[in-house]
Image (cartoon, helix red, strand yellow):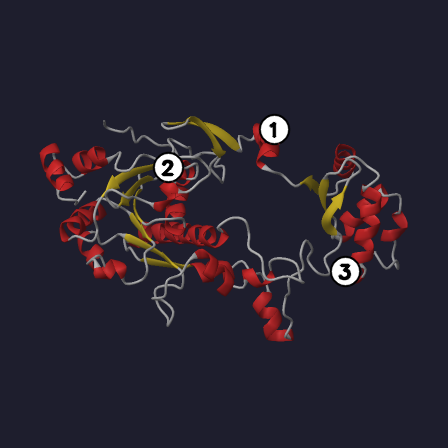
């Protein structure tokens, strides 16, 4: 049952060993797999990644096919010395290792970076954790939600009269994964020049912190603390969601002076952008934010959504619907760019999911297959790559090693 590993993409020829679970580490490997890397996912025998059980179906997960796509699955017990020795054999054939266990776990299993280097001096070890590999909190258990709180995101999400909200996705894990992927590719380029591997230490809280714009600097210089502001950014106007005559909500972002002048023209009030008017400057519009939003809402309520969007488009004013999945599937722009693709799946037959991002002009990535069954590629990897024959594999399986 040898799997065809021919892949397009700029990372074709790069082999990644993923030893992780849930989202933060695995999504980093997914991003590399989307760009052509051969990702071998190492999972515990009998159980596998908990993501295999997450998702909105009666039985099979609809999340696993997405996060597990473009990966080969092998089972391996890293808690046993024999399993650790097999893992080191995989490392010897790899370029990158991704792990997201609590710091110290790999060391406890005899898989420290120093040990990995002994079998592969050029190996790049990508480590994703809640708090990083060093510091007084490093050994604490850290989930994405805790990193979002510590990194400053949770405090500013939601309405000002309520407790902090959360994003409806695991944004902390995903941000850590993206930074881990950037680190892996940076380390790969360094290795291309010097031949040296290194450790990439990506923490969830710092990955969130990196996206917090000037939040820390504003406090450091002016003791200004950003607060929860609901659907708006304070003093950035107009940039909000506005109602339409047919009961839809349209987001209009016209906070730049030149763009606001075009919105004012479309609304029949060119004088609002004339020099000297209180709305003509960014600062002035920020001070009159609530008043201006009320005026725009009153105007958009006289137009149906399609009419409003056409008017904004023709006037060069950024505007758009707030999309749900059904809107995405019907939208001609999504269709023209293949933003969502239908791919074969061994459980569901066909599945629609988001395509590879970003689009590369010369080396486009592809979705070659969806999330595999647990241990589906044991024969491919252990026989073809490591030369472990069927009799030896059967013995290892019987003893719970693979």
Residue 10 can be seen in this image: no
391 vs 210, left or right, is: left
Residue 330's label in the rendered image is 1
Residue at 76% x, 34% y is 310
Give the vertical position of 348 relative to 76 (above or below).
above
Residue neighbourhood size for the residue with mark 3, other residues' Cα within 10 Å, grouped as few (<14), some (14–19), many (≥20) = many
Q: Identify whether 314 is placed above or below 285.
A: above
The residue that disc 2 covers is 36
Q: Which circle's residue, 1 or 3, is located before the other in the chain?
A: 3
The picture places residue 402, in percent across and down from the top left corner, at 19, 42
The kind of secondary structure element at disc 3 is: helix
Which is nearer the eye, 164 or 212? 164
Residue at the disc numbered 3: 286
* Numbered disc 2: secondary structure: loop
Question: Which residue corresponds to the image point at 32% horizontal and 60% vertical from the top-left?
Answer: 102
Q: Residue furthest front?
A: 58
Count of numbered circles on the image: 3
């Amino acid at each position: 049952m040898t799997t065809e590993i021919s892949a397009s993409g700029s990372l074709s020829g790069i082999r990644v060993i993923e030893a992780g679970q849930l989202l933060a580490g695995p999504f980093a490997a997914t991003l590399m797999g989307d760009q052509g890397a051969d990702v071998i996912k190492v999972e515990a025998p009998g159980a596998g990644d908990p993501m295999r059980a997450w998702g909105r179906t009666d039985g099979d997960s609809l999340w696993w096919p997405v996060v597990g796509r473009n990966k080969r699955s092998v089972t391996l017990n890293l808690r046993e010395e024999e399993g650790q020795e097999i893992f080191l054999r995989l490392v010897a054939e790899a370029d990158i290792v991704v792990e997201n266990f609590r710091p110290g776990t790999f060391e406890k299993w005899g898989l420290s970076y120093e040990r990995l280097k002994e079998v592969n001096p050029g190996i790049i070890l990508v480590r994703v954790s809640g708090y990083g590999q060093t510091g007084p909190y490093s050994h604490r258990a850290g989930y994405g939600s805790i990193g979002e709180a510590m990194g400053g995101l949770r405090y500013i999400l939601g309405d000002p009269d309520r407790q902090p909200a959360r994003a409806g996705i695991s944004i902390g894990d995903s941000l850590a994964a993206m930074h881990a992927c950037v680190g892996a590719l940076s380390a790969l380029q360094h290795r291309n020049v010097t031949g040296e591997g290194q450790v990439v230490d990506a923490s969830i809280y710092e990955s969130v912190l990196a996206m917090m714009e000037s939040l820390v600097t504003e406090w450091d210089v002016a003791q200004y603390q950003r607060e929860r502001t609901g659907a708006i950014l304070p003093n950035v106007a107009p940039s909000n969601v506005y109602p339409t005559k047919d009961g839809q909500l349209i987001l209009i972002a016209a906070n730049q002076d030149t763009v606001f002048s075009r919105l004012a023209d479309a609304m029949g009030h060119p004088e609002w952008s004339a020099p000297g008017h209180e709305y003509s400057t960014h600062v002035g519009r920020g001070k009159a934010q609530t008043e201006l939003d009320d005026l725009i809402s009153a105007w958009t309520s006289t137009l149906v959504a399609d009419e409003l969007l056409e008017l904004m488009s023709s006037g060069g004013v950024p505007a758009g619907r707030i999309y749900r999945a059904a809107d995405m599937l019907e939208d001609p722009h999504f269709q023209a760019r293949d933003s969502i693709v239908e791919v074969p799946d061994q459980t569901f037959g066909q599945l629609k999911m988001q395509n590879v991002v970003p689009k590369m002009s010369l080396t486009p990535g592809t979705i070659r297959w969806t999330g595999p069954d647990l241990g589906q590629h044991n024969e491919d990897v252990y026989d073809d790559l490591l030369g472990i024959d069927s009799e030896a594999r059967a013995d290892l399986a019987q003893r719970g090693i693979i």
